[in-house]
Amino acid sequence: MMLYKIASALLEYPDQELKSALPEITSLLYVNEISAEERSTLKRFLQWLDAQDVTDLQASYVTTFDMNPEHSLHLTHHLFGDDRGRGPALIDLSEYYRGYGLEADAKELPDYLPLILEFASTLEEIEAKVFLGQTVKVLTQLAANLETAESPYAPLIRLIEKRGQLAPVSGASITV
């Protein structure tokens, strides 16, 4: 599931390594699973990334995702804030990953969108869509918040949201 792998990388904190990888990422856009519309959205985002200085990208990223709770890439934050209900949701998600043999990096919470996308990239297509279908409500709100802020990251979130909307969520075992 190359789209999820690409989106995961693009939603991580930007650095020179990401900038250096842009030609390789661009070449990955031409796999069959990525539609022409998705490819166009990703190409525009990659062009924006390429035109930015790394320091400016980093400042923009921090301002967008770290300084504004409405833009948090930690999806359970949008559902629970800092409420106690968030803990069990994080534990459930960690257990879900463990069921697939994935031990999440201890320095990152399991609801971090790039981690969720990296995990989804390892699943079969329908399974990934069902898994991500559980996040659609949060992704819809996150994308709307980013669009209101005129963030260039909003279209990336919309791509994932659209993929998740294509799947029924019945039978899913976790709720993000």
Image (tube, rainbow, N blue to C red):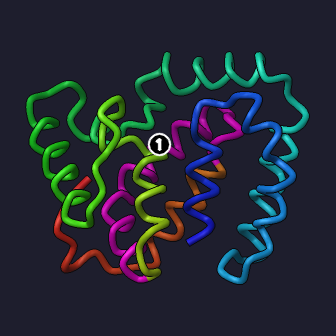
Indicate the position of residue 148 as horizontal and vertical percent values: 60, 35
Give the quadrant of the N terminus: bottom right
Give the quarter of the image for residue 109. Answer: top left
Q: Is 145 colored magenta in this rendering?
A: yes
> Residue at image x 82%, y 58%?
26
Secondary structure category for the residue under label 1: helix
Q: Is residue 155 above or below residue 18?
A: below
Residue on which disc 1 sits: 142
Q: Name the magenta segment's main secondary structure.
A: helix
Rendered view: 156 above or below 56? below
Outermost residue to the right: 51
- Count of marks placed on residues: 1
Does the magenta-highlighted stretch encompass residue 108?
A: no
Binning the other alpha carbons within 10 Å of mark 1 as few (below 14), some (14 to 19) or many (20 upward) gives many
Which residue is painted at 41% across and 73% down in the image?
A: 123
Q: Amino acid at mark 1?
A: Leu
Q: Quadrant of residue 10?
A: top right
Q: Quadrant of residue 43?
A: bottom right
Query: Is residue 125 toward the left or the right of residue 90 in the image?
Result: right
Residue 165 position, x and y percent, is 44, 71
Residue visible at 62% across and 65% down?
3
| Magenta residues, start to end | 126-154
